[in-house]
Image: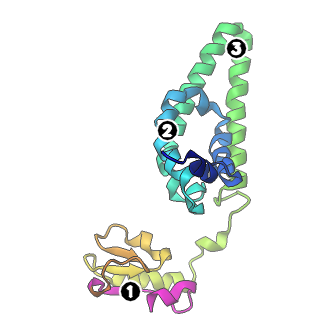
Amino acid sequence: MRQPSTVLEHVLVPAKFEFVLQLLVPLVFVPLLGGEVLALALPTFGYLLISDNPFQTSIRFQYTAPLIPFLFFAAILGLARASRWLNRRLGNRARFGAATLLAGLLGVASLANYFFQSPGPLARHFDPSQYAMTARVALGYQLLSRIPLDAPTIAESDFVSHLSQRVSIYQAPNAPDLRKIEYVLADKNFGPYKEYQ
């Protein structure tokens, strides 16, 4: 690498620090105690942190999926190490209390993270309207059922995941050859409709 300062300019920014904290705080930084497992995730951390795409350094998108197993395996190893350390330094009674405190802290941090970060039920960002069966969604499902399974299709982001078992499914404008597309599923009232025209 000839210009490490350029890399650091992309990595050492507040949004990327926040991203790392969002990954580690719910696990009370315990994965850091399983460093050798966490080290296996460094290539993934590397390409995510160097990216300028804000979606890649957000816990709300799929880009962090490759990190999750490493974080949890490192957390398991870290908890085992912390437990052994406590066993050596504390008596039986204090050891049980410390282990219970650590487990409780991990549980509280995970629940707090769910409440503050998740879009799921009982969380702060939960929006039930996103799961409502509106007329538009019902029509979309009805149209999806009419598209043959082997037909190359381009669809809005709302419906692409429902077509993921197909060999040829695209989301506009990312179709390699529009001449091969047989079906288009798009709503004229949806924001990015221009891309489908």
Crowdedness near tag 1: few (<14), some (14–19) or many (≥20) residues, C-alpha within 10 Å: some
Residue under the point 61% across and 72% down? 130
| Residue kind at label 1, given as amino acid type | Val
Residue under the point 54% across and 57% down? 51
Q: Which mark is residue 52?
A: none
Quarter containing the C terminus: bottom left
Crowdedness near tag 3: few (<14), some (14–19) or many (≥20) residues, C-alpha within 10 Å: some
| Residue kind at label 3, given as amino acid type | Arg
Residue under the point 64% across and 11% down? 87
Picture quadrant of residue 15: bottom right
Question: Does the magenta run of residues contain 196?
Answer: yes
Q: Which residue is mark 2?
A: 70
Region of the chain picked out in magenta, as a range: 180-197
Dot 3 falls on a residue whose secondary structure is helix
Left or right of 145 in this view: 3: right
Question: Does the magenta run of residues contain 108?
Answer: no
Q: Nearer the viewer, mark 1 or mark 3?
A: 1
- Rendered location of residue 93, percent (x, y): 73, 11
Q: Earlier in the sequence, mark 2 or mark 1?
A: 2
Report the number of numbered marks: 3
Dot 2 falls on a residue whose secondary structure is helix
Q: Which residue is mark 1?
A: 184
Q: Which residue is mark 3?
A: 95
Dot 1 falls on a residue whose secondary structure is strand
Picture quadrant of residue 161: bottom left
Crowdedness near tag 2: few (<14), some (14–19) or many (≥20) residues, C-alpha within 10 Å: many
Q: Earlier in the sequence, mark 3 or mark 2?
A: 2
| Residue kind at label 2, given as amino acid type | Phe
